[in-house]
Structure formats: C-alpha cells, structure tokens
Image (cartoon, rainbow, N blue to C red):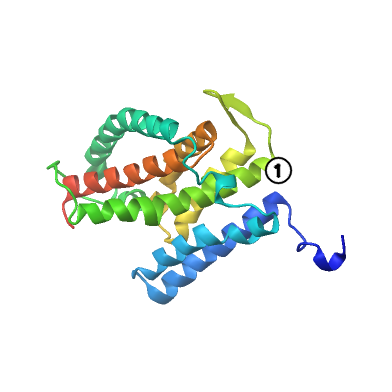
Amino acid sequence: MSSALAPPTRLSAVQEVVVLWAVGFLGIIVSFVLFGGSSIPKLVATVGFLYLPLIPMRWRDEDYRDYGLTLRAWRQDVRLFLTFSLIVGPLFFAGFYLWVEVLPHLPSGLARLLSPHVGVAHFTPRLPPRFPEWVIDQLFVVALPEEFFYRGYMQTRLRDAWPHGRKVFGVRLGPAFWLTQVLFALGHLAIFQAWRLSVFFPALLFGWMRERTGTVVGAALFHAACNLFVRFLEVSFFGGA
C-alpha cells in the first residue's frame, strides 16, 4: 500500500487508552475550573466518553458494537442486572445504614474526608424531587457514556495488550480488568473528594458484567441503578433536594 494511504501511526493499546483517559480527565477538570458547578462539566464528560474513542476506532474501521454498545445479549444483560440488584441492594442498604451510624462518632475532619454527608441521620423513605428526570439523566447521560468509555472501549483495548488473567466466576480477569477499574476511580477525582474513590468497588461488578455478557448494557443499567439508589438513600437519611 502507498504510504500516502496508510492510516496514522498508531499507539500501543495501553498508550492509546492512557492518552485518551488523560485528555478526558483534563477536559473535565478544566471545565470545572472555568464553569464551576454548572451543567457544562457533565456535558464535557458525556461528550468525551462517547466520542474520544471514535478517533482510534476510525483508524481501525471499528464501530460502537465492537466495544459492547449493542443489544445482542439484552436478555442476559437484563437477567444479570436484576440478579445483581436483588443481591447488592439489600446488602448496600445495610452497609449504608451502619455507616450512617458510625459517621457521627468520627472526628469531623475525617468524616468529611470519607463522606459527603456528616451528622446525625434518620431514615424516612422519600424519592428525590423530579425523580423521573434523574432516571433518564443517570442512564443516558452518566451510566451509558461511562460504561462505553471504561468497560466498553478501555477494558477491551487493554485486554488486547493483556489478554491473560485468572477466571473469577466464569470470567477471565487480568491486568486489563484491574487497571480499568483503577482509572475509573481516579477519573472521579476530577472533583477532588477522597470519598469518590469508593466507586472502585461497584466498578468491579460493572467490569465483571461486561466480560460476562460481552456488552455494556447490563453494566450501564446496574450502574444507573446504583447511582439512583445512593441518591434515594441520601435523601431518605439526610433530607435535602
């Protein structure tokens, strides 16, 4: 082939992922600096997660389906989403309740480092205001773009570099899996609050689901459900909008 027709020089899979992650992370930080708590940083994150991977994908003549954005396994995705929700939901509620009981007994500085909420709380079930809007926002603006970028694109590309790993409940998990979840957690530090690193733990489930079904649909559903459940618990325990 003529050199004039050759595609651009390609980075290795690991370099490609780290560069795109850094560009996205920096874009979110800059938007926070410039626009503060407006909706602009969220828009920057959503657009970056959905479109940054398109640059190298076009070089390889790939599309979203190659990275798990497909309904080809939707039945399995829905089954896993419902199963995980039924198992994790009650366990997380119990853990959240115990954590709320512990928080008032911690030094105030430590409590603020580990939690966005501080003080005595009482559980009164209530939905956040405009809850249907929250559902749409969390699924299509937050969870789906993040799952495509991290579990779809990033986890797949890193697996190209590190295909090996140990099987965990029928799914092979190796360096690609672990690095994806670490970068996912670090990406949440665009707003520098230490408690945001806790997203590493649900990310382990999101990543496992992606490997199990071959798509990001179930992980996106569960991701959105987790965010909504946390918001429900925050409003129910601490009140506020």
199 with respect to 69 (left or right): left
Q: What is the quadrant of residue 155 in the picture? A: top right
Report if residue 109 is visible in the image: no
Q: Report the residue at 38% width, 54% height from top.
A: 140
Task: Work out which quarter of the rendered image holds the C terminus and state it.
Answer: bottom left
Q: Residue furthest right?
A: 2
Q: What is the quadrant of residue 11 in the picture? A: bottom right
Task: Work out which quarter of the rendered image holds the N terminus and state it.
Answer: bottom right
x, y percent for residue 119? 20, 49
x, y percent for residue 24? 54, 62
Q: Nearer the viewer, residue 94 or 171?
A: 171
217 with respect to 82 (left or right): right
Badge 1 density bin: few <14, some 14–19, many ≥20, Cα 10 Å: few
Q: Nearer the viewer, residue 72 or 203?
A: 72
Q: Nearer the viewer, residue 241 or 96?
A: 241
Circle 1: element type: helix
- Residue named by callout 1: 161
Q: Residue furthest left?
A: 124
Q: What is the quadrant of residue 92 in the picture? A: top left
Report if residue 206 is visible in the image: yes
9 with respect to 90 (left or right): right
Amino acid type at image mark 1: Ala
x, y percent for residue 39? 35, 68
Q: Check the image and report above or below for 2 versus 85.
A: below
Q: Check the image and report above or below for 167 versus 239.
A: above
Q: Report the residue at 27% width, 43% height from top.
A: 229
